[in-house]
């Protein structure tokens, strides 16, 4: 492992892709790959803790993923439930706050109930925020914020108050990621070089890192390579250095 990494990103986000291909290449069904992917999640959380990464968000299931076969979707929801139950003691032990961001209306009721319990239980933990993006899409997030702004305007009008001026700060605060800094680094596994409707607003100035490694094979040394790459980036945010 490298020791020269001096610039640790505050928020790392991972598009965990390639479970299906990993499983198929081994002659198994796709759920076998999703199952194996849980081990990679554990390794990533452990690495994030070791490196002092403050926010780790993981794209686990997109709004578009609801369009997959029922068997895969329900298998993924079961897997998510099992993982939250199994990891619950880990959150307490390592001071991890769990948050789920996504369209809860689409998620199974029992999973939502479990997640809400664990979110409440871990709300004061502050070493690492583990954010699972579940039934999430960037456009959904932006639409939600727009709808909230619409409501704010309607309420203001009803009360005879001025319409709140919409600027970047106000809009950012209306997104479902309110309070979470924009990702400094997004890692995508499996060789795909696209954003797939992820964090569209938040990723405006995020550094992107793509790796051929399939998610079930992603381990600390792969994470380390991504951090090394980030360490060598020069972020300018449109200004001059
Ligand atoms: C990522 O792996 C996990 C989810 C999208 C739920 P995939 O299931 O997309 O795996 P590939 O891309 O088909 O290999
Ligand atoms: C993106 O992967 C979503 C997640 C990793 C949860 P997909 O496999 O769904 O993305 P596309 O279809 O290749 O763009
Ligand atoms: Mg995929």
Image (cartoon, grey):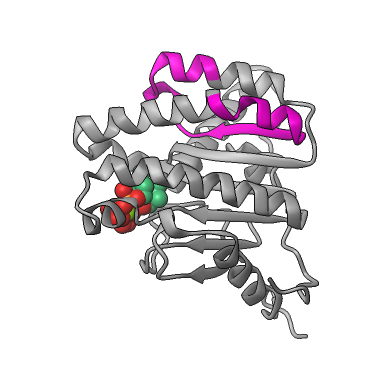
- The correct choice, above or below, for 74 with respect to 64 in the image is above
Give the quadrant of residue 71.
top left
Give the quadrant of residue 140.
top left
Give the quadrant of residue 208.
bottom right
From the viewer's perspective, tell me whether residue 106 is left or right of residue 164.
left
From the viewer's perspective, tell me whether residue 234 is left or right of residue 103.
right
* Image position, residue 9 (x, y; %): 72, 62
The answer to whether one can see residue 204 in this image is no
Magenta residue span: 86-114
The answer to whether one can see residue 4 in this image is yes
* Image position, residue 238 (x, y; %): 67, 77
* Image position, residue 160 (x, y; %): 69, 21
Of residues 155 and 69, which is closer to you in this image? 69
Q: Residue at x 70, y 19 (%)?
A: 121
Of residues 146 and 17, which is closer to you in this image? 17
Q: Residue at x 78, y 54 (%)?
A: 52
Queried whether the magenta region covers residue 199, the answer comes back as no
- The correct choice, above or below, for 172 with respect to 122 in the image is below
Give the number of marks. Answer: 0
Give the farthest residue toward the bottom: 241
Q: For the C terminus, which image quadrant?
A: bottom right
Queried whether the magenta region covers residue 105, the answer comes back as yes
């Amino acid at each position: 492992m490298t020791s020269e990494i001096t610039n640790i990103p505050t928020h790392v986000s991972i598009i965990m892709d390639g479970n299906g291909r990993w499983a198929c290449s081994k002659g198994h069904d796709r759920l076998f790959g999703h199952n194996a992917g849980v081990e990679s999640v554990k390794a990533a959380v452990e690495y994030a803790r070791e490196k002092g990464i403050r926010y780790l968000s993981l794209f686990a299931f997109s709004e578009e993923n609801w369009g997959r076969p029922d068997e895969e979707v329900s298998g993924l929801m079961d897997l998510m439930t099992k993982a939250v139950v199994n990891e619950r003691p880990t959150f307490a032990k390592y001071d991890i706050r769990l948050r789920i961001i996504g369209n809860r209306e689409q998620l199974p009721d029992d999973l939502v109930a479990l997640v809400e319990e664990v979110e409440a239980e871990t709300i004061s933990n502050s070493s690492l925020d583990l954010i699972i993006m579940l039934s999430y899409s960037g456009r959904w997030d932006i639409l939600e914020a727009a709808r909230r702004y619409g409501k704010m305007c309607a309420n203001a009008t009803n009360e005879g108050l001025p319409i709140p001026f919409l600027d970047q700060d106000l809009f950012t605060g209306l997104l479902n990621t309110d309070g979470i800094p924009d990702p400094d680094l997004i890692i995508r596994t499996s060789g795909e070089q696209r954003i797939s409707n992820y964090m569209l607003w938040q990723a405006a100035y995020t550094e992107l890192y793509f790796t051929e490694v399939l998610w079930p094979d992603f381990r600390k040394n792969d994470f380390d390579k991504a951090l090394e790459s980030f360490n060598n980036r020069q972020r300018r945010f449109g200004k001059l250095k």
